[in-house]
Amino acid sequence: MTTLTAVHAGLGSPSSTELLTGRLAASAQRLLPDARVRTVHLRDLARDVADNLVTGFPGARLREALAEVVDADALIAVTPTFNASYSGLFKSFVDVLEPGSLEGKPVLIGATGGSERHSLVLDHAMRPLFAHLKAIVLPTGVYAASSDWGAEGLPGRIDRAAGELADLLTGRPAPAKRSGEDFVPFDRLLAER
């Protein structure tokens, strides 16, 4: 059985970060029907993460969450964007992982933010972080600005990223071009706004 762990650092409940995490996990589950999906809400572990940073030892709840991440076949990691990067809670959780524990693990990255201006968080913060940890970061990351919710493009990006994750986990070759995936020139995207 394939196991997926979805980790998010959404601070509200509900939050757009939690919503994006749920949609990514649901899309992956749809493509991998035999997969077991677990979700780790870092908001609930904030104090445990801080205690671990200070003492050097995880408590029982954090130890269980760390095991879910380390033992999973793949990871879905989603953070809210704070000051053009991942949140401190998200980074602190990554900091308490044992070195080498994500090596070779496929990771689907995602982020949320108030505007499209912060979408580079995926490529200048999330992707380098997981590359440093020697994880396999999927080509498509999903960023969702406030204006993306209910808009046309977000479901397609979610399905594309989940499809890449499913292809990697099942050993299927990636299709040359996924259906519904047409290149849209950037100037046309701007004109439509």
Image: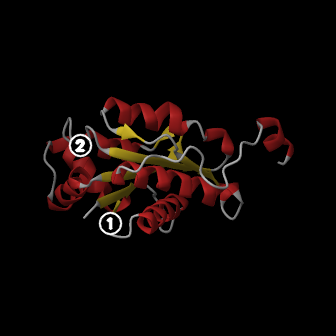
Label 1 or label 2, whichever lies nearer to me, is: 1
25 w.r.t. 91: above or below: below
x, y (%) of residue 186? Answer: 77, 37
Look at the picture and state if 63 lies above or below 190: below
Q: Is residue 84 visible?
A: no
Nearest the eye: 150 or 29: 29
User: Is 150 on the left or on the right of 123, as rendered?
Assistant: right
Residue 141 in the image, given as x and y percentages of width and height: 52, 45
Q: Earlier along the polypeptide chain: callout 1 or callout 2? A: 1
Q: CA distance from mark 1 to mark 2?
A: 26 Å
Residue under circle 1?
35
Type of amino acid under label 2: Val
For the N terminus, the quadrant is bottom left
Q: Amino acid at mark 1?
A: Ala
User: Where, by quadrant of the figure, is residue 60 drawn?
Assistant: bottom left
Give the residue displayed 28% in from the left and 61% down from the top: 2
Q: Image height check: is 131 above or below 163?
A: above
Q: Position of residue 77 (x, y in %)?
A: 40, 50
Q: Secondary structure at mark 1?
A: loop
Does residue 162 appear left or right of residue 153 in this picture? left
